[in-house]
Image (cartoon, rainbow, N blue to C red):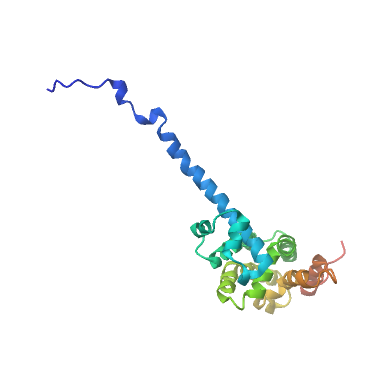
């Protein structure tokens, strides 16, 4: 047996109880929060720049300046301008379309469900800065097909899928007489798209009541509502 003296038990106490390890556990969370804040600031600044300059003319230097970060910080989060724009679409529009696309089967009429769908689009897209993103897609999508393809996958295809499901239900219930409408769900959302385009080009000359347009449009599809 060794004659080497044993260390007092207190000196072998677990180091975690001294509090030394606590800061290292808290620091990552703090860094993650700061990183998330910077990422959100970059995306918000990108929206401003894309709206003001268009996709082609927007420079990451300008986005960084508006966000208050170094240009290199952008590359910590996004590979290039295209991926930054995709993130903008994901955060601003995809959640909204996802919410609409998962609407439960309507307890009332299919018309009510379609009207709610279109009203939400008009209120949360056409009348907000989200509408500027759609106008940007329309203006620059032909020159940047990858952006248009991304938008179709993430937004358009989901919205059309939700429309087809509601149209099919309306046909099954006898609420929609024209079965061919199922092949053209774009017809149902046409007033919302018109509202987006009209607002940017002609609203100052002839303001458009998008909700009234929607009601007339649905009357053409379902027939006029019966008086209460």
Pick the residue in front: 167 or 153: 153
Residue 78, given in percent of the width and then of the height, sits at 51, 61
Give me the residue at 80% from left, 72% from top: 202
Residue 105, given in percent of the width and then of the height, sits at 66, 61
In the rendered image, the quadrant that contains the C terminus is bottom right
Horizontally, is 206 left or right of 34 in the view? right
Pick the residue in front: 52 or 127: 52
Give me the residue at 30% from left, 26% from top: 12
Task: Judge whether 27 appears above or below 219 on screen.
Answer: above
Horizontally, is 20 left or right of 220 in the view? left
Task: Judge whether 16 appears above or below 193 on screen.
Answer: above
Residue furthest toward the right? 227
Q: Quadrant of residue 144?
A: bottom right
Q: Please indicate, yes or no, whether residue 149 appears anywhere in the rendered image.
A: yes
Pick the residue in front: 189 or 17: 17
Horizontally, is 54 left or right of 4 in the view? right
Horizontally, is 118 left or right of 156 in the view? right
Q: Quadrant of residue 152?
A: bottom right
Give me the residue at 67% from left, 75% from top: 139
Pick the residue in front: 25 or 93: 25
Q: Please indicate, yes or no, whether residue 166 appears anywhere in the rendered image.
A: no
Q: How many marks?
A: 0
In the rendered image, the quadrant that contains the N terminus is top left
Residue 127, given in percent of the width and then of the height, sits at 75, 62
Residue 141, given in percent of the width and then of the height, sits at 62, 75
Q: Quadrant of residue 149?
A: bottom right
């Amino acid at each position: 047996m060794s004659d080497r003296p044993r260390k007092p038990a207190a000196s072998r106490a677990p180091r975690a109880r001294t509090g030394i390890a606590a800061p290292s556990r808290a620091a990552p969370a703090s860094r993650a929060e700061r990183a998330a804040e910077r990422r959100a600031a970059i995306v918000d600044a990108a929206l401003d720049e894309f709206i003001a300059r268009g996709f082609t003319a927007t420079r990451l230097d300008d986005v960084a300046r508006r966000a208050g970060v170094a240009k290199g910080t952008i590359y910590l989060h996004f590979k290039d301008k295209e991926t930054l724009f995709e993130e903008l679409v994901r955060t601003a529009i995809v959640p909204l379309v996802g919410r609409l696309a998962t609407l439960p089967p309507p307890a009332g009429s299919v018309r009510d469900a379609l009207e709610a769908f279109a009203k939400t689009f008009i209120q949360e897209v056409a009348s907000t800065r989200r509408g500027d993103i759609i106008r940007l897609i329309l203006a620059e999508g032909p020159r940047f097909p990858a952006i248009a393809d991304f938008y179709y996958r993430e937004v358009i295809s989901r919205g059309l899928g939700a429309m087809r499901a509601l149209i099919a239900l309306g046909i099954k219930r006898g609420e929609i007489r024209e079965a061919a409408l199922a092949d053209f769900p774009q017809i149902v959302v046409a007033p919302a798209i018109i509202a987006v385009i009209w607002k940017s080009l002609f609203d100052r000359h002839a303001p458009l009541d998008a909700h009234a347009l929607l009601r007339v449009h649905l009357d053409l599809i379902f027939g006029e509502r019966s008086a209460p």
